[in-house]
Image (spheres, rainbow, N blue to C red):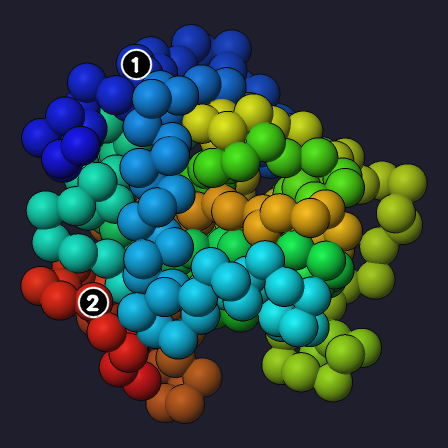
């Protein structure tokens, strides 16, 4: 399968006004069947290839020895690949534009893979706890399931309407790393069960997280993040705001050869 077939394999998502209103009110929107089921294995294989080229093999992801890592994240992808078209093509950007009510620029795409046998809990947080975007509602995360998602394998969980509280003060996680954590009532958290090919869109202020993957197979997902032209980000190192389209926070163009990602 080649990238030339991708536009035929992403299902049309002509969102209604009520779906856009739900997204604004609840802070998230489920997008069932965003990807045609025929493309899911090929996209999943590309993600495995990227991780393998960057030192994380499929065998490792299927082993409990890799489960201590919360999430295997990598933004690398091959030029002309299915991932390239998924990230930079018009189909998913059209969904982002509709929900952002403006243009959509790629921010930070990355794999979101949890190893089998206990692959880590990802503490509840807001994406804006990592890099502050303003206006926060000018950015979006479209999170794509590439295996069926259940609480057993650490499906995404969201807190509906949590974005209405604005940006919350976070702290370094209890695990002693630099991941951010919010203290939330677990009864507020809504597990999002998904079929492979489904997606969920949520705002940069929507509180979300996930439990461990205690299933025998890796949990594979992909995060597509976009922003409008008017969004600025705060550079903590230089104590200044930058317009994202003029000064990107991350450089994530496609590469011609997979290999260890540059720091």
Q: Residue at x 62, y 70 (%)?
A: 66
Mark 1 Cα-neighbour bin, 10 Å: few <14, some 14–19, many ≥20: some
- In the displayed structure image, the side of residue 212 where residue 187 appears, left or right: right
Q: Position of residue 3 (x, y in %)?
A: 14, 36
- Decide if residue 196 is in sight here: yes
Residue underneath mark 1: 12
Q: Residue at x 65, y 55 (%)?
A: 116
Q: Which mark is residue 258?
A: 2
- Decide if residue 97 is in sight here: no
| Element at label 2 | loop
Q: Position of residue 123 (x, y in %)?
A: 72, 62
- In the displayed structure image, the side of residue 193 where residue 61 appears, left or right: left
Q: Is residue 20 above or below residue 158?
A: above
Q: Residue at x 13, y 67 (%)?
A: 257
Q: Position of residue 222 (x, y in %)?
A: 43, 47
Quadrant of the rendering where the C terminus is positioned: bottom left
Quadrant of the rendering where the N terminus is positioned: top left
Residue 77: name its quadrant. bottom left
Q: Position of residue 45 (x, y in %)?
A: 35, 46
- In the displayed structure image, the side of residue 24 where residue 16 appears, left or right: left
| Element at label 1 | loop
Whichever of callouts 2 and 1 sits on the residue coming sooner in the sequence is 1
Q: Residue at x 31, y 28 (%)?
A: 39
Q: Are marks 2 and 1 in contact (CB under 8 Å)?
A: no
Residue 159: name its quadrant. top right
| Foreground of the two, 86 or 131 | 86
Q: Which mark is residue 139?
A: none
Q: Is residue 132 above or below residue 195?
A: below
Q: What is the spatial separation of the Cα atoms under label 2 and label 1, in whole angstroms? A: 30 Å
Mark 2 Cα-neighbour bin, 10 Å: few <14, some 14–19, many ≥20: some
């Amino acid at each position: 399968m080649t990238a030339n077939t991708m536009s035929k394999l992403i299902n049309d998502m002509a969102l209604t006004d009520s779906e856009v209103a739900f997204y604004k009110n609840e802070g998230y929107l489920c997008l069932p069947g965003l990807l045609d089921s025929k493309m899911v294995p090929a996209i999943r294989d590309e993600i495995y290839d990227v991780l393998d080229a960057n030192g994380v093999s499929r065998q490792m992801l299927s082993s409990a020895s890799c489960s201590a890592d919360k999430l295997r994240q990598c933004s690398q992808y091959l030029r002309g690949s299915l991932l390239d078209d998924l990230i930079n093509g018009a189909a998913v950007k059209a969904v982002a534009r509709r929900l952002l009510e403006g243009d959509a620029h790629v921010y930070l795409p990355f794999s979101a893979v949890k190893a089998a046998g206990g692959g880590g809990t990802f503490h509840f947080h807001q994406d804006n706890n990592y890099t502050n975007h303003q206006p926060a509602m000018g950015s979006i995360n479209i999170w794509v399931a590439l295996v069926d998602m259940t609480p057993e394998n650490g499906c995404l969980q969201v807190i509906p309407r949590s974005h209405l509280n604005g940006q919350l003060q976070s702290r370094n996680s209890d695990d002693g790393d630099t991941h951010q954590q919010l203290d939330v009532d677990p009864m507020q958290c809504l597990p999002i069960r998904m079929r492979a090919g489904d997606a969920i869109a949520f705002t940069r202020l929507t509180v979300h997280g996930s439990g461990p993957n205690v299933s025998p197979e890796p949990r594979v997902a992909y995060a597509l993040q976009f922003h409008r032209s008017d969004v600025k980000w705060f550079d903590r190192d230089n104590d200044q705001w930058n317009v994202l389209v003029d000064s990107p926070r991350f450089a994530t163009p496609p590469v011609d050869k997979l290999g260890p990602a540059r720091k």
